[in-house]
Amino acid sequence: MSDQLTAGVVGGSGFTGGELLRLLDGHPNFDIEQATSRSYERKTVGHVHPNLRHLDLRFTSPEDLESVDVLFTATPHGVSMEHIDAFQDAADTVVDLSADFRLSEAAQYDEWYDGHVCPEYLEQSEYALPELNRENLPGADLIAAGGCNATATILGLKPLFDAGILSGDEQVVVDVKVGSSEGGAGASKASSHAERSGIVRPYAPTGHRHEAEIEEYLGLSVSFTVHAVDMVRGAAATCHVFPDGPVSKGDMWKAFRGSYGDEPFMRTVAGGGGVYRYPEPKSVAGTNFGEVGFEIDPGNRRLVVFSAIDNMMKGSAGQAVHAANIALGLDETAGLDFTGFHPVGSP
């Protein structure tokens, strides 16, 4: 395969679509051929995304897809499943950032979403998160990026399963706090600045759809709650784990180093010195890094596991590009090996 590939973005005017365009613009192996938007057809990309004003690119209709090597689809839930045939006709590799192909069985979509119109595609889709599914990504032609809340939770808990600390039968309570960009670029009463500013708002106390991904890929049923908080970027998961037996700090360090010691985008931050002693979205904002950490509460026989990601990067666009790099045989860190800022304001 050639080292230089063409790429397109469907839904390029949304927050995640803009993040994809930003990453592809700086990627050494991708040339952006097309970005689509129904609302902004014929407008320049910079008209919507001011950080991309330098791009000589205008939005086109999603009905007129150009042929590309890889097509990233940043569409609302339900759109990609309706148009997957057209997407696959346009590109050898499709990376979908919606929820349409994240789960493996139609019954899961009946339970957690509104059903599925093309369940025959679910079996061929590969989950994008490389730390979980790297071995199945090379050569994949349909890749599904994970949900940001599920990604943060899975990254935090996976080392405990890898090390045998958890088996899947234990009680685990997960509290996730997310920034406003998770809601997308569409306006609503709840997302207006006057209503959103200063909040810590439980918006999914129970029954969040991302529970389905956690259950499928970890084999664990969790008690899961999500809060909307006053930040733009970021997802932070705090997992309260009650293992069957005693677990030492050495066991935990061994587990996290064993799972992520060789991962290019994972960092373990667990109670060191300084201000940032545990994972925090502010320290990974704008990057594809994920931070994980832990603390032990022996008096309550509890482990507290922390994880933090940028929801639009590690939780969406960055994860998608990372997976595409692996699927296409590129350097897996290509276009993603940059650090964040410090100090920085609200993520």
Image (cartoon, rainbow, N blue to C red):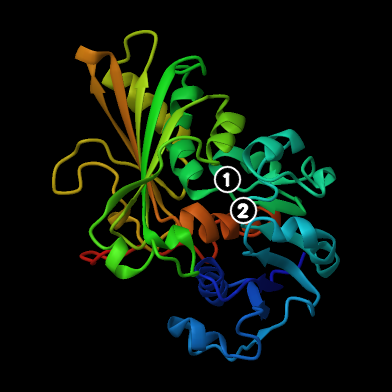
Where in the figure is residue 244, as x and y percent of width and height?
39, 9
Residue 132: tell me if it is visible: yes
- The correct choice, above or below, for 109 with respect to 252 in the image is below
Q: Nearer the viewer, residue 314 or 214?
A: 214
Where in the figure is residue 278, as x and y percent of width and height?
25, 41
Residue 347: tell me if it is visible: no
Number of other residues with Cα within 10 Å of mark 2, as a class: few under 14, some 14 to 19, many 20 or more: many
What residue sits 19% from the left and 39% below the top?
272
- Mark number for residue 130? 1
Number of other residues with Cα within 10 Å of mark 1, as a class: few under 14, some 14 to 19, many 20 or more: many
Q: Residue furthest top?
A: 245
- The correct choice, above or below, for 241 with respect to 184 in the image is above
- Mark 2 / mark 1, whichever is N-terminal: 1
Which of the image's four quarters has the C terminus?
bottom left
Between the C-alphas of marks 2 and 1, the distance is 6 Å
Callout 1, which amino acid? Pro
Callout 2, which amino acid? Ala
What residue sits 79% from the left and 40% below the top?
123
- Residue hosting label 2: 323
- The correct choice, above or below, for 159 with respect to 3 in the image is above
Q: Nearer the viewer, residue 196 or 101?
A: 196
What residue sits 79% from the left and 44% below the top?
124
Residue 340 as seen in the image, left or right of residue 333: left
